[in-house]
Image: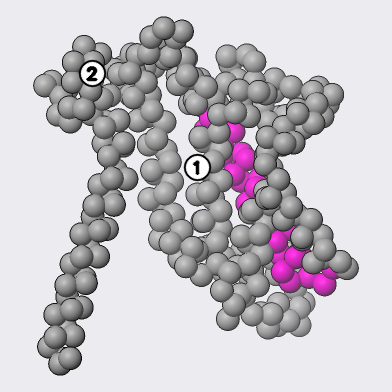
């Protein structure tokens, strides 16, 4: 096969791959685009033609009523508060534990690390009842503190950061120790600044998971003043009916913060996915 034929085959393969990627993107974006279109329509229009993409007129009152029908603002603030606090604590605690597993000489650290990994293998539903029992006995049921307490640890976060920290050369730590730095200074001033990619990945994963968490807040929160946005969206569904316009408008509002977080950390996120776990 000549060079020209090879170029033609490569070009054909490129266009086929581009078509597959575009088609996959459209399939992925379809629910999101339908959600936006539905949020801009009245219930009459929605039931008349559910799959219509272009509303006859933009019905913006859904976005106004979603904040008035239920205490959506309170739910939004609660979710923001819990997500930011838990994400910050997980990044701090997981990074310190990962640094110890990756760089410090700790007795039986590999055995301890394997025990941490078993936390990933065990479904949360299997420990849900004993965990709830402990929180209740501590008097933290129906409090934000109890919910935060069960979420500040993440075996996945420790694993993710440990794998990244192991790619950083040990010579950096040795040089810092010679200059008189203790382990805390090495961790905070050397390791953390060099780990923006892995940290951004963990932040995006944790933020997304905590923002979308439904089951744990449903179990731990009883008062309306403590509930999160995912529980609030459920209130648009009654026993016999569902207000799809308000539900989709609320879902769009609930999705915006996640999109913003991803756009802010997208560069580091993709870099972290590509490099985490690789050894220099």
- Give yes or no for residue 166 being in the magenta stretch: no
**Residue at the bottom extreme of this rendering:** 2
Work out whether mark 2 precedes mark 1 in sequence or the reverse, and give the earlier one: 2
Above or below residue 139? Residue 83 is: below
Name the residue: 53% across, 48% down.
Answer: 205
- Mark 2, other Cα within 10 Å: few <14 / some 14–19 / many ≥20: some
- Residue 141: quarter of image: top right
Name the residue: 56% across, 38% down.
Answer: 210
Image side of residue 203 versus residue 238, left or right: right
Residue 46 is tagged as 2
**Residue at the top extreme of this rendering:** 240
Residue 133: x and y, percent?
A: 80, 26
Residue 153: x and y, percent?
A: 70, 46
Write down the region rendered in magenta.
79-106
Residue 201: x and y, percent?
A: 51, 56
- Mark 1, other Cα within 10 Å: few <14 / some 14–19 / many ≥20: some
- Residue 191 visible within the image: no
């Amino acid at each position: 096969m000549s060079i020209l034929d090879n170029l033609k085959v490569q070009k054909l393969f490129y266009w086929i791959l581009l078509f597959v990627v575009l088609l996959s993107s459209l399939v992925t974006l379809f629910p999101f685009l339908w959600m936006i279109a539905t949020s801009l329509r009245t219930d009459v229009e929605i039931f008349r033609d559910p799959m219509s993409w272009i509303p006859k007129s933009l019905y913006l009152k859904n976005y106004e009523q979603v904040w008035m029908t239920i205490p959506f603002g309170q739910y939004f603030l609660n979710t923001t508060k819990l997500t930011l606090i838990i994400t910050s604590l997980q990044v701090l605690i997981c990074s310190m534990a990962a640094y110890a597993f990756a760089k410090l000489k700790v007795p039986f650290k590999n055995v301890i690390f394997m025990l941490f990994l078993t936390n990933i293998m065990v479904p949360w539903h299997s420990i849900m009842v004993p965990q709830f029992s402990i929180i209740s006995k501590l008097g933290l049921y129906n409090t934000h503190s109890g919910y935060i307490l069960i979420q500040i640890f993440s075996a996945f976060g420790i694993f993710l950061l440990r794998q990244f920290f192991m790619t950083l050369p040990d010579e950096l730590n040795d040089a810092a120790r010679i200059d008189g730095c203790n382990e805390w200074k090495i961790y905070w001033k050397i390791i953390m600044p060099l780990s923006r990619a892995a940290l951004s990945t963990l932040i995006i994963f944790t933020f997304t998971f905590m923002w979308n968490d439904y089951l744990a807040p449903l179990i731990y929160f009883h008062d309306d003043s403590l509930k999160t946005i995912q529980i609030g969206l459920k209130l648009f569904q009654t026993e016999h009916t569902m207000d799809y316009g308000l539900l989709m408008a609320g879902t769009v509002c609930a999705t915006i913060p996640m999109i913003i977080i991803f756009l802010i950390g997208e560069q580091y996120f993709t870099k972290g996915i590509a490099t985490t776990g690789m050894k220099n």
